[in-house]
Image (cartoon, grey):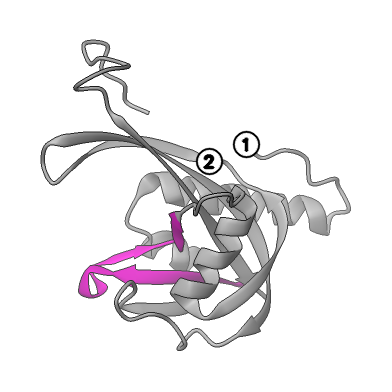
Amino acid sequence: MDADASLPVKGPGAPRRDHSAGGLVVRDSEVLLISTLGGRRWQLPKGHLEPGETPEQAAVREVREETGVTGRILAPLPAIEYRYRERGRLLVDKRVDFFLLAYEEGNELDFDPREVYRAAWFPWDEALSRITFENERRVVRAARKLLDRLAAGEPAGEER
């Protein structure tokens, strides 16, 4: 996260903390992405944790809500952290925990159009070229390395 040492950590003016979770769903040799902002932005499905929900539960729920696809968690992936301004003023420190999910069932045409413009499967390399944000491309590269290790019979290990 790009922290500015001059910004307060607590109290008025301190950044609000936001915690989300998301999933990278794999099916055969494809990755599931969502498009937002009228198709101008491609990214991994993710969203806020609900009260009492674990990051793993939130990742599975958000993937299902945003894509219509159900996945089973295989392993954790690297989390991403970043800072942004909400409505141009309020600073937000955001953390997104990502998980590698195996496709189980569902149809990528069954999603909430209020949240997502489109959901689609892409080969790994095309997914990497479409994803808008570099921090999410790093998550995809880590997932691919992890799957290669698993295919070679190596332990999953901790990707975070």
Quadrant of res 128: bottom left
Residue at the outermost front position:
51
Does residue 124 appear left or right of residue 158 in this picture? left
Q: Which residue is mark 1?
A: 160
Does residue 131 appear left or right of residue 88 in this picture? right
Q: Secondary structure at mark 1?
A: loop
Residue 49 location (% of width, % of height): 49, 52
Mark 1 neighbour density, 10 Å: few (under 14) some (14–19) many (20 or more): few
Q: Foreground residue, 132 or 85?
A: 85
Above-or-below relation of 72 to 96? below
Quadrant of res 115: bottom left
Does residue 22 appear left or right of residue 82 in this picture? right
Residue 2 location (% of width, % of height): 32, 25
Q: Is residue 123 visible?
A: no
Which is nearer the N-term, disc 2 or disc 1?
Answer: 2
Q: Residue 79, labelled with which disc?
A: 2
Q: Are marks 2 and 1 in contact (CB under 8 Å)?
A: yes
Which corner quadrant holds the N terminus?
A: top left
What residue do we see at 38% from left, 80% from top? 112
Residue bounds of the magenta highlight:
30-47
Q: CA distance from mark 2 to mark 1?
A: 6 Å
Q: Indicate whether residue 81 is drawn in magenta.
A: no
What residue do we see at 49% from left, 54% from top? 50
Which corner quadrant holds the C terminus?
A: top right
Q: Secondary structure at mark 2?
A: loop
Q: Is residue 89 visible?
A: yes
Mark 2 residue type = Ala
Q: Main secondary structure of the magenta part?
A: strand
Residue 145 location (% of width, % of height): 66, 50
